[in-house]
Image: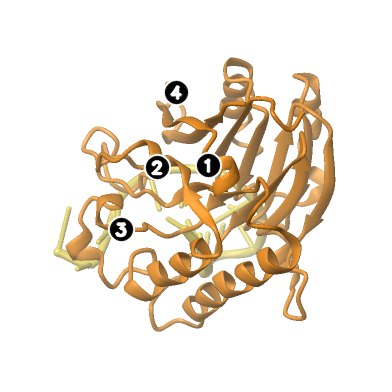
Amino acid sequence: MKNDNFIIATFNTNSIRSRLHIVIPWLERNPVDVLCMQETKVQDKDFPKEAFNKIGYNVIYKGQKSYNGVAIAGKHEIKDMAAGFDDSENSPEDEARLIRCVVKDIPVVNAYVPQGRALDHMYFQIKLRWFERLRDLFDRNYSTDEPLLWCGDLNIAPDSRDVYAPDSYLDHVCFHEDARKALEKVKEWGFVDVFRKLNTDPDQYTFYDYRIPNAVKRRLGWRIDHILATAALAERAEKAYIDITPRLAQKPSDHTFLVAEFGS
DNA sequence: ATGGTCGACTCTCGA
């Protein structure tokens, strides 16, 4: 299995229950090995797992009422599920933001990093701390020499190509220098930004604020969702792309899936 | 211009 092809995708659902009409048909058309989801906004007892099982996917999830929530769907057996951090600071909210497992012998870490709210807000410090704790988690549990995928809504645009108006967002919690440095320090552990390795053009975004009219058409977005891999795996990356599923008639919002494909 | 619109759930919060 180790040298098999592997396709992974990540999608911020903004409520899995209200996005089933998007996610399930997308998976049927795009039978990825693994789909990481964030902002499922549902308690575990109400997670719609049958909808995934019905189309041949296993799914693991950890959520809470109203906010946050993460899940991983996989076409194969899902092993070694764990939620939250393995540190003394771990909280129920952390568990609804971080879930990991192993699929086809490849460890997958799915994160919904706290957005941070404002530079002077306590939550921004929590966000910066989150990246330190992630690095510790990688140190303790994984090897830089082995395949590993770190995916999710990391709420950071890594550089000026990754936000539509960088100069006006220098003090934004998703683009401030301290935030970008926090992500960079985790990358230095041993990650390659798989999308950026294969696509150098600017204006390729994974998030469009639906409060901005026609944001997709006007290219007013952010690249804050990511798929990162250790070098051993990144070398096998053949293709990475952002699939924008346009809003359906009568249904709000556009939906962006970030996909990466690895060869043998 | 400092807005806008979603989604969950009590009505206001978070993004």
Q: Earlier in the sequence, mark 1 or mark 2?
A: 2
Q: Chain of mark 2?
A: A
Density class for disc 1 (Cα within 10 Å; few <14, some 14-19, many ≥20) is many
Determine whether A96 is above or below A29 in the image: below
Disc on the earlier residue, 3 or 2: 3
Kindly identify which residue carries mark 3.
A159
Q: Amino acid at mark 3?
A: Asp
Horizontal and vertical percent for residue B9?
Answer: 67, 56
Q: Which chain is orange?
A: A
Q: Quadrant of residue B5?
A: top left
Counting residues from the start of the chain, the first of labels 2 and 4 encountered is: 2
Query: How far is mark 3 from mark 2, CA to CA?
Result: 14 Å
Q: Which residue is found at the position 21% from the left and 37% from the top?
A: A218
Residue at position x 56%, y 27% in the image: A22
Q: Are marks 1 and 2 in contact (CB under 8 Å)?
A: yes
| Residue toward you, A8 or A213 | A8
